[in-house]
Image (cartoon, rainbow, N blue to C red):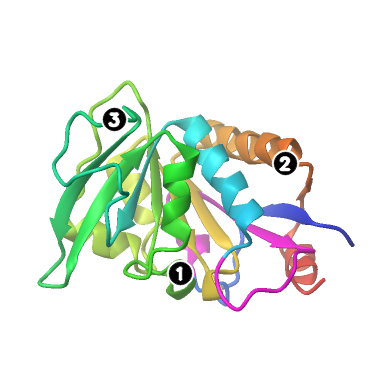
């Protein structure tokens, strides 16, 4: 099991991944992990983050939280220089201002992994992927709170045709929820292609092997 790799397990049931009771999910769920990279104190190795950002942006419009706007954007902007991202200011129950950033640009999506105001490593972040042909996704404060809770996968059921992605324990794994098998297969294929493009190995494993690979 040596060498840098990304691996995925479908239908996990263990709760120690800190992603809620996924066995009770109405949606299809999976977890993704990685191993064989230089150790870092917190967060996701840059190349893994790039693979995930690319895979998600290849699927559709990606939304995530940001405590600061990317430099090329302004809150409430509807036409922007890159023409690939849009941001709206959001106040969440009296906390500091947060933004929801919508993008098809993997370089913009990468910002989600390092934002101190929506920390990936503390499970304070998420991604939602929607169709580019429909209207921009509008989220209520309650839906955002749900996406940051153990019930994150239920938002997929509530919103319909979306893909939800949330960090698991210590930000060292990723939870994926899709509304059905076909959408789930599309996510797996997109991650597989982005992984291989980055010249990394990609594996589909069961939950026991997933845990063993994390320790490799």
10 Å neighbourhood of mark 2: few (<14), some, or many (≥20)? few
Observer-side mark, 2 or 3, equals: 3
Q: Kindly identify the residue that appears in the image at 23 percent across and 28 percent down.
A: 135
Specify the quadrant of the image occupied by residue 40. Answer: bottom right
Q: Which residue is mark 2?
A: 198
In 3D space, how far apart are the residues under numbered discs 2 and 3 (Cα atoms)? 28 Å
Sequence-wise, the earlier of marks 3 and 1 is 1
Q: Position of residue 34 (x, y in %)?
A: 70, 60
Kindly state the secondary structure of the residue where label 3 is placed. loop
Q: Kindly identify the residue that appears in the image at 41 percent across and 55 percent down.
A: 153
Is 131 located above or below residue 144 in the figure? Answer: above
The span picked out in magenta is 19-43
Q: Which mark is residue 176?
A: none
10 Å neighbourhood of mark 3: few (<14), some, or many (≥20)? few
Q: Kindly identify the residue that appears in the image at 35 percent across and 46 percent down.
A: 157
Q: Which mark is residue 81?
A: 3
Q: Position of residue 181 (x, y in %)?
A: 55, 36
Sequence-wise, the earlier of marks 2 and 1 is 1
Q: Is residue 16 left or right of residue 117?
A: right
Q: Residue furthest right?
A: 2
Q: Kindly identify the residue that appears in the image at 17 percent across and 32 percent down.
A: 78
Q: Position of residue 184 (x, y in %)?
A: 55, 39
Q: Is residue 160 left or right of residue 22?
A: left
Q: Which residue is mark 1?
A: 20
Disc 2, disc 3: CB below 8 Å? no
Observer-side mark, 2 or 1, equals: 2
Specify the quadrant of the image occupied by residue 119. Answer: bottom left
In 3D space, how far apart are the residues under numbered discs 3 and 1 (Cα atoms)? 39 Å
């Amino acid at each position: 099991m040596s060498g840098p790799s990304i691996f995925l397990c479908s239908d996990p049931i263990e709760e120690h991944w800190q992603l809620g009771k996924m066995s009770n999910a109405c949606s299809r769920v999976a977890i993704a992990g990685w191993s064989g990279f230089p150790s870092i104190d917190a967060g996701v190795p840059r190349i893994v983050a790039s693979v995930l950002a690319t895979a998600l942006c290849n699927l559709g419009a990606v939304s995530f939280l940001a405590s600061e706007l990317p430099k090329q954007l302004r809150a409430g902007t509807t036409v922007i220089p890159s023409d690939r991202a849009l941001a709206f200011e959001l106040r969440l129950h009296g906390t500091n201002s947060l933004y929801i950033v919508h993008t098809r640009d993997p370089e913009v999506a990468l910002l989600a992994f390092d934002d101190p105001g929506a920390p990936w490593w503390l499970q304070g972040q998420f991604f939602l992927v929607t169709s580019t042909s429909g209207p921009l996704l509008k989220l209520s404060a309650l839906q955002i709170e749900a996406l940051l809770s153990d019930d994150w996968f239920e938002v997929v059921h509530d919103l319909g045709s979306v893909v939800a992605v949330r960090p698991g324990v210590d930000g060292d794994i990723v939870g994926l929820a899709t509304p059905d098998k076909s959408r789930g297969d599309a996510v797996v294929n997109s991650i597989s292609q982005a992984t291989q493009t980055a010249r990394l190995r990609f594996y589909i494993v069961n939950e026991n092997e997933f845990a063993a690979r994390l320790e490799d």
